[in-house]
Amino acid sequence: MPDARNDNPGSIEDDWLGAPMYFSHFDAATTRALIQRAGIRILSADLVEEEDGRDAGAVFLWVIGRVD
């Protein structure tokens, strides 16, 4: 399951909503840096842990940004 606290160079979940899905991502700090380097001003960035359902325990980085 994706976790924004850690790097995931690539993994496949065989049955994600009925189909295989490829996941990859950087840790939260790297993701924030890449967003800012792309010219996006981060207005908020929060790590949110899923509490219910199939993603329970997974942590996702939710970012709101703005291009000025």
Image (spheres, grey):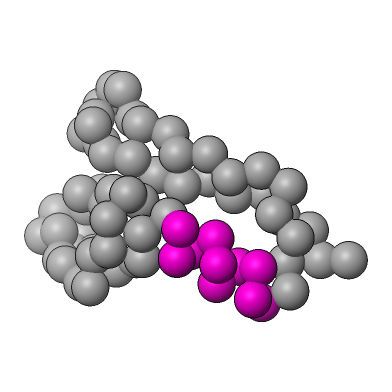
Which residue is pictured at 73% across the width and 47% down the height? 43
Which residue is pictured at 27% across the width and 55% down the height? 6
Which residue is pictured at 74% across the width and 74% down the height? 39
Numbered label tally: 0
Q: Where is residue 14 shown, x and y percent of the image?
A: 11, 60
Which residue is pictured at 43% across the width and 55% down the height? 28
Quarter of the image where the C terminus is located: bottom right
Q: Is residue 26 visible?
A: yes
Q: Is residue 4 left or right of residue 54?
A: right
Query: What is the magenta range?
Result: 29-38
Residue reaching furthest to the bottom: 38
Q: Where is residue 1 shown, x and y percent of the image?
A: 20, 49
The chief SS type of the magenta part is helix
Q: As rendered, which of 24 and 17 lies closer to the eye?
A: 24
Is 36 within the magenta?
Answer: yes
Is 39 within the magenta?
Answer: no
Q: Is residue 22 visible?
A: no
Q: Where is residue 41 shown, x and y percent of the image?
A: 75, 60
Q: Where is residue 30 shown, x and y percent of the image?
A: 45, 66
Q: Vertically, is 37 above or below 3?
A: below
Q: Vertically, is 55 above or below 38?
A: above
Q: Is residue 53 left or right of residue 37?
A: left
Q: Is residue 66 left or right of residue 34?
A: right
Q: Vertically, is 39 above or below 62?
A: below
